[in-house]
Amino acid sequence: MAACYVLLARTSFGLRICASLEKPSLARASGISSHTIYSITFAFGAALAGLAGALIVPVFSLFSDLGIRFLIQGFVAVTVGGVGSFAGPLAGASVIGTLSAALLWVMSPVIADVLVFVLAIVFVKFRPRGLISARGV
């Protein structure tokens, strides 16, 4: 996580990624190849997803829809944390992960998952930009 933050926030490559995402036409006019940046970031994201899959398989048994639960929890974490900053999804993942783990001690896993999602929906209703959102978004 720290390495990804340093890559995105402290390097010229991270600056090119931000430029390509926020203003693609201006980035192309500045000499940045947006298609190359998109390809590299897609490959990097796919590599991170592959690493996550390789790390999760020893913990859970492998089956065809293994990632669906984590995909939904990840979406909820990003929604609760806020889109547009690096700290937002990190904060959302901390909140959702803590709630998911803590509620398992008090109630059944199915009810705990449903309660986490209900609490996330209620939170997003009152704070639609999330815990931490970008200034311009």
Image (cartoon, grey):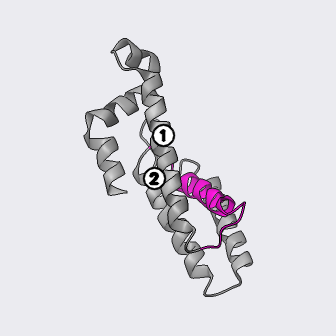
Q: How crowded is mark 2: few (under 14 residues within 10 Å), some or many (20 or more)?
A: many
x, y percent for residue 118: 70, 65
Q: How crowded is mark 1: few (under 14 residues within 10 Å), some or many (20 or more)?
A: few
Location of residue 33 with respect to 115 vertically, above or below: above
Q: Which disc is residue 125 wearing?
A: none
Name of the residue lying farthest toward the bottom: 106
Q: Nearer the viewer, residue 128 or 63?
A: 63
Q: Which disc is residue 88 wearing?
A: 2
Q: Which amino acid does label 2 sit on?
A: Gly
Mark 2 to mark 1 CA distance (whole Å) = 23 Å
User: Pointer 1: what residue?
Assistant: 43
User: Which residue range is magenta in the image?
Assistant: 60-84
x, y percent for residue 123: 61, 60
Circle 2: element type: helix
Number of numbered callouts drawn: 2
Quadrant (top left, top right, bottom left, bottom right) of the N terminus: bottom left
The answer to whether residue 11 is left or right of residue 35 is left
Residue depicted at 64% across the width and 60% down the height: 67
Residue 36, by quadrant, is: top left
Location of residue 10 with respect to 103 vertically, above or below: above
Residue depicted at 44% across the width and 58% down the height: 90
